[in-house]
Image: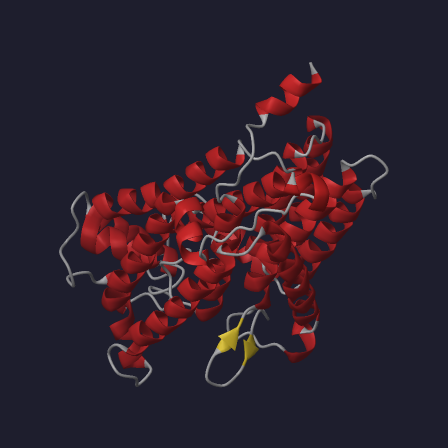
Amino acid sequence: MTDMVYGTVPVRDVEPVLPKWWRTVDRWSLSCVLLLFGVGLLLGLAASPPLAERNGFGAFHYVQRQTLFGGLALIAMVLTSMMSPVLVRRLAVLGFACAFVALALLPFLGTDFGKGATRWYSLGFASVQPSEFLKPGFVVVAAWLLAAGQEIGGPPGRLWSFILTVTIVLMLALQPDFGQACLVLFGWGVMYFISGAPIVLLMVIAGLVIVAGTVAYHNSEHFARRIDGFLNPEVDPTTQLGYATNAIREGGFFGVGVGEGEVKWSLPDAHTDFIIAVAAEEYGLVLVLAIIALYATIVFRSLMRLMRERDPFIRLAGAGLAVTFGVQAMINMGVAVRLLPAKGMTLPFVSYGGSSLIAGGIAVGMLLAFTRARPQGQIGDLWKGRS
């Protein structure tokens, strides 16, 4: 009778934030991320002391910095994973706008640190790579546009997302950073395919990418040098690829032993781009397979949980973040074993690097937020209701 007179009172969700987050988050993926970070610290203890010694720092200088950046990354991941999809989208749009402006100003204010590609801002005590923070924001913004384009009377989201993607790819290619450009394009292609794009159109885009790669090969010495090095059947043993290949060969199945590896004394990027070579040499194929399994578990579980999601935006954004995360790991490890040309890309949560660690924490936090269990029916219920 009270409800008839005064109306019903909406039931408020009084469950505390932390218990609700722990109940709904994908704990398997969360555990895998923590294990990857632990493996990164373990390998950092092996790989970074030689570099610290060459640069005049204490033996554990880079390990301490990785612990600091990793702690910030884990905090960012947990806080982001507690957010609602709407709040994640709003913050992603704001973060993407800031990263896009920072990327556009790199040719004027950035530095290359002697590596031949202007990708960083030097802050004196640290450096920032805008493209790392651009990726998760771009995925969410592109997914939002693609989802909006599926609505009746909605904007031309597919066209806008394509224009945005091409713009970012060109900006990255001009640095040059072809690895990140390919990663951005691949992530968008997966989301575009999931949103219902015809396969013929994707094949046309793939053809245009091949044409663009041919043009870049003939006009970019940086790009041509890396492709030539990849295609050359003979590996120069004094190059980074040569050292990494030899280290992986020497490691065998069980490795040469903790602290017994030699590649860390020769590779300048042993703690970043070629960290997997250190893992293969000292701990063998066993640890490498364990690392691959951790990445595969995160990607597979995320995609399986997203298959039950009814919101098109969440499905697209989550899938884009998951495949981008997984493909970046594949590219890093593929370069070390000469399956791919050198890209200068870190191994998420394992390699040293402030920008990559913190941006990776934000990206995985977004993914965990999108894959949290929510009160909804199965996606198949939508089809049952239409029949």
Q: Nearer the viewer, residue 15 or 152?
A: 15
Residue at 17%, 50% in the rendered image: 255
Question: Is 40 left or right of 215, judged from the image as shown?
Answer: left
Q: Position of residue 114 (x, y in %)?
A: 51, 75
The quadrant of the rendering that contains the N terminus is top right
- Residue 158 visible at all: yes
Residue at 60%, 43% in the rendered image: 314
Residue at 54%, 56% in the rendered image: 83
Residue at 70%, 39% in the rendered image: 4
User: Compared to 335, does 73 lie above or below?
Assistant: below
Query: Which residue is at the far right?
Result: 153
Query: Which residue is at the far top?
Result: 387
Q: Nearer the viewer, residue 237 or 386?
A: 386
Query: Which residue is at the far front?
Result: 1
Number of residue marks: 0
Q: Position of residue 239 (x, y in %)?
A: 37, 61
Q: Position of residue 260 (x, y in %)?
A: 15, 61
User: Compared to 39, does 214 lie above or below?
Assistant: above
- Residue 233 visible at all: no
The quadrant of the rendering that contains the C terminus is top right
Question: Is 98 left or right of 128, judged from the image as shown?
Answer: right
Q: Nearer the viewer, residue 253 or 211?
A: 253
What's the coloring here? secondary structure
Q: Quadrant of residue 69?
A: bottom left
User: Compared to 319, does 228 lie above or below?
Assistant: below
Q: Position of residue 374 (x, y in %)?
A: 52, 41
Question: Is 379 left or right of 250, judged from the image as shown?
Answer: right
